[in-house]
Image (cartoon, rainbow, N blue to C red):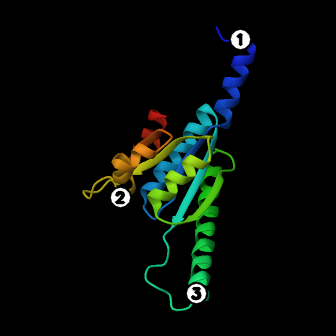
Amino acid sequence: MPTGESAGQAERERRDRVFLVVVDDTPERLVAMRYAALRVRKSGGRVALLRVVEPVQGQIEWAGIGAMMAEERLEEAEALLAGAADEVQKMGAGVPVLIAREGKPVEEVLRVVAEDPRISILVLASASGPGGPGPLITALAGKAGAKLRAPMTIVPGWLDERELERVT
C-alpha cells in the first residue's frame, strides 16, 4: 500500500503529465485532439499542441525575404494553434500548451519530446484512407521511433465520439 508521500508524488506525476498532439493539416488531427482531451479529462494531465512548419524550399535570393516568409508561416501556425486550443478547451481539457516550430516534422517531434520530460504520451491519429497511416506515423514507427523518448498512441482516424469515449 502506498504511503501518503508516495501517493502524493504519484498524483503530482499524473497531474503534470502531458499528452502531445501534432496539429497538421489532416482531418485526423481532430480525432487525436479529442482522444488526448478525453484522456486528460478522465485521468488528469494536460494537452500540448505542436504545429511544425517546414522551412521554405529552395534558395531565397534575399535573406530578408526568407526571414519574413518564415515569420509569416510561424504566425499562421500560431493562429491555427489558437483555434485548436479553443477546441481542446471546449472538450473540457483545460488550456493546452502551444508549441510552434519550424523544421522537419519528425525531427521537431523528437526534439520537443526530448526537451520536455513532462511529455508522457505522443498521440497521433492514423489516416483512414488507403494511403497508409500517414508519413509521420510511418517514420516514427520505423527507425526514427528508436529515438522517441515517450510512448506513442496511434488512434484510428475514423473513430467517432462514441468510440473515443469507449476506448479512453
Residue 7: x %, y % from top left: 69, 18
Q: Position of residue 72 (x, y in %)?
A: 60, 79
Residue denoted by label 3 = 63
Give the distance between the C-alpha atoms of the residues marked 3 and 2, in whole angstroms: 30 Å
Which numbered circle lies on residue 135?
Answer: 2
* View extreme (top): residue: 1
Q: Is residue 94 above or below residue 60?
A: above
**CB under 8 Å between discs 3 and 2:** no
Labels 3 and 2: the sequence-earlier one? 3
> Hey, which quadrant is residue 80 in on the image?
bottom right
In space, the residues marked 1 and 3 are separated at their CA atoms by 60 Å
Residue 155 point in image, percent of width and height: 41, 44
Q: Which residue is mark 1?
A: 3
Amino acid under label 2?
Answer: Pro
Give, as a three-letter code, the residue at label 1. Answer: Thr
Nearer to us of marks 1 and 3 is 3
Q: Earlier in the sequence, mark 1 or mark 2?
A: 1
Q: Is residue 158 visible?
A: no
Query: Nearer the N terminus, badge 1 or badge 3?
Result: 1
Q: Position of residue 143 (x, y in %)?
A: 35, 48
Q: Residue furthest left?
A: 130
Labelled disc at residue 123: none
Mark 2 is surrounded, within 10 Å at the Cα level, by few (under 14), some (14 to 19) or many (20 or more) other residues, namely some
Mark 1 vs mark 2, CA separation in Å: 45 Å
- In the rendered image, the quadrant that contains the N terminus is top right
